[in-house]
Amino acid sequence: QVQLIESGGGLVQAGGSLRLSCAASGRTSGGYAMGWARQAPGKEREFVAAIGWRGDSTYYSDSVKGRFTISRDNAKNTAYLQMNDLKPEDTAVYYCAARRGYYGATSRTPLYDYWGQGTQVTVSS
């Protein structure tokens, strides 16, 4: 089992920045791809960014492309989501996800094996 703990959420004004972190613990040996999804009230979960196990492949949804950057530090078993130029529509609970195996980035939610509990991001106008 792998446990994922997100941190870094909070309240920010439009145009501001936040950096989310996702620390993995437990059976972290071997490769695993990671990603971030978000869910706003009354909306479906949206996968916004993903990164392959080596960090050399990434995916971004159109809604965040150019504003968000996903990265990872395998030595620390941690993934990050740098969010710049935040907009009120970015308000959501952000979830970290991990897919065990030596895979590249994917936005296909069912392929992920583990999920964190989520961290709230609120962007005020």
Image (cartoon, rainbow, N blue to C red):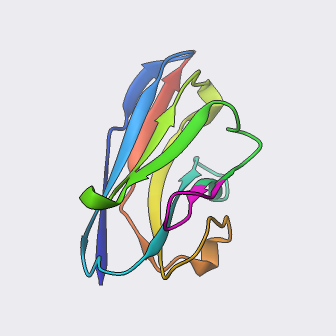
In the rendered image, residue 37, in percent from the top left (x then y), is placed at 56, 56
Front residue of 94 and 98: 98
Front residue of 44 and 23: 23
Q: Quadrant of residue 23?
A: bottom left
Find the magenta span and give its range: 50-58
- Residue at 60 percent across and 79 percent down: it is 111
- Residue at 37 percent across and 38 percent down: it is 9
Q: Is residue 18 left or right of residue 38?
A: left
- Residue at 56 percent across and 51 percent down: it is 38
In the rendered image, residue 79, in percent from the top left (x then y), is placed at 39, 53
Compared to residue 28, the image places residue 94 above or below, namely above
Based on the picture, tell me whether residue 71 belongs to the magenta stretch: no
Q: Main secondary structure of the magenta part?
A: loop
Q: Quadrant of the N terminus?
A: bottom left
- Residue at 51 percent across and 25 percent down: it is 123
Based on the picture, tell me whether residue 53 belongs to the magenta stretch: yes
Compared to residue 115, the image places residue 94 above or below, namely above
Q: Is residue 80 left or right of residue 61?
A: left
Q: Quadrant of the C terminus?
A: top right
Q: Quadrant of residue 12?
A: top left
